Amino acid sequence: MNEIPAPETFPVTQRNRAKRLHERASYDREAVHAVLDAALLCHVAYVIDGQPYCTPTIHWREGDWLFWHGSSASRMLKSQKSGIPVCLTVAHLDGLVLARSGFHHSANYRSVMCFGNARIIDDPEDKAEALKAVVNRFYPARAAELRDNDPQEAKGTMVIGMRIEEASAKIRTGGVSDDPADIDARVWAGVIPVETRLGAPEICPKVPEGVSYPDHLAHFRQGRRLDEVLTESQTLYEKQG
Amino acid sequence: MNEIPAPETFPVTQRNRAKRLHERASYDREAVHAVLDAALLCHVAYVIDGQPYCTPTIHWREGDWLFWHGSSASRMLKSQKSGIPVCLTVAHLDGLVLARSGFHHSANYRSVMCFGNARIIDDPEDKAEALKAVVNRFYPARAAELRDNDPQEAKGTMVIGMRIEEASAKIRTGGVSDDPADIDARVWAGVIPVETRLGAPEICPKVPEGVSYPDHLAHFRQGRRLDEVLTESQTLYEKQG
């Protein structure tokens, strides 16, 4: 079967077109995936009776599909099988930008907003696949070392999925952007980088003697950047199929 | 004038009551403020024509009020002077929790969801105050070293504010919570800590000679945790009034 390759950019509509600072925006599929794959945490916005909710949760990606676990939207999703509109957002903070004027203070960041229709993944095979993927996407090959979920666990876990219909990435990098008139001010200006890194793994004291740190976690080394490690996990996961 | 002290907990309603894992939830005012004050980035959810949006942005707090800059909701806010319902969420990732079964994999985190009615702060004095606060809250006493915003800058910056009507904090800390039946499995289980820290300040190459790193940034030292530094900034800011 011939697959139709996905276009290189997401469509731009009223919904995902950047409203502010559009020079920082991109609709490029690879750019969007890169920001998503570098993160464990996302924020999902949805509406119940006109009230917006913003829930932080763990997300994972397969192609243009995003998945996450049940949330307070679950009850509503159960009654609306066709799904509900959501916006799933990921943001990485990369630096504090201190300018010579209050106005030009800023932050370096990478973010994406993804729009789609979220629904419950309730086909048993799809769901089992997704529950394996959430382990293997972060810790490739780990699921094979664990027992299978028992039926009660699978039943007690809700998986929500959505195809990314539209998305936009927004990225700021680099130094201070000051007004030329302010450049000679005797004010310290610059960037203070911000980085999220891994600490030393803390083994559970009840792990039997002789069990050592596994190969599949080799890239989770103390001091490494979390975004780089998670991107590496996604690449490994996609290779292992 | 006698001030009525704020109650120690936020009211619990259908909107902010924790729907899942309620043993991790708290409605305590100090717990909510602590999670907010340790972060620069928040995510704001709002609704336009039934479509939810989740925008990452910088937030700052004064008492039970939260502030942030304009967003794609701005146009709607301009037409609805009485405000729109929003949910402002902050989440810190503190660790990866690797269990002996897929089901018990988790993350350590601190999060809050705050509910209220957002409106444009357009009174000129309130707005000038808020624009000074966004600098001083993160970098206490810095605003005094900068020129004032010119009228065009103040006009070009939108400040949105909301009083926190309801809020909940949700926190997971500690080690793996495995099923007792799985404890003897020969699987590496434990926690990999995640920490967000400051890098070495990078001075803008155009800063005049003789300008050194300022005292008001002394606590932004390389290697320090961002959440601790920002909490310290908030405390300093509140003391300086």
Image (tube, coloured by chain):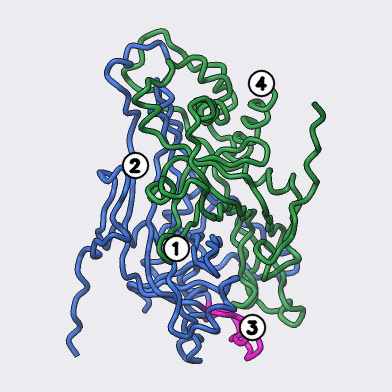
Chain colours: A blue, B green
Q: Secondary structure at mark 3?
A: helix
Parent chain of label 1: B
- Looking at the rendering, the stretch of residues picked out in magenta corresponds to A143-159
> As rendered, which of B88 and B182 lies closer to the eye?
B88
- Tell me, yes or no, whether dots 4 and 2 are on the same chain: no
Q: Secondary structure at mark 1?
A: strand
User: Which disc, if any, is residue A208?
Assistant: none
Parent chain of label 4: B
In this figure, which residue is indicated by the disc labeled 1? B52
Residue B23 point in image, percent of width and height: 76, 66
Name which residue lies at 58% across and 54% down. Answer: B93
Quadrant of residue A108 within the rendered picture: top left
In this figure, which residue is indicated by the disc labeled 4? B240
Distance between mark 2 and mark 3 Cα atoms: 40 Å
Parent chain of label 3: A
In this figure, which residue is indicated by the disc labeled 3? A156
Judged left or right of residue A3, residue A208 is right
Quadrant that contains the N terminus of chain A? bottom left
Distance between mark 1 and mark 4 Cα atoms: 38 Å
In this figure, which residue is indicated by the disc labeled 2? A172
Q: Which three-letter amino acid code belongs to the residue tagged 2?
A: Arg
Quadrant that contains the C terminus of chain A? bottom left
Name which residue lies at 78% across and 50% down. Answer: B9
Looking at this view, name the residue that lies furthest to the top. B210
Are the two marked residues, 1 and 2, in contact with CB atoms closer than 8 angstroms? no
The relative height of residue B127 versus residue B192 in the rendered view (above or below) is above
Distance between mark 3 and mark 1 Cα atoms: 27 Å
Q: Secondary structure at mark 4?
A: helix
Residue A85 point in image, percent of width and height: 42, 71
Are the two marked residues, 4 and 3, in contact with CB atoms closer than 8 angstroms? no
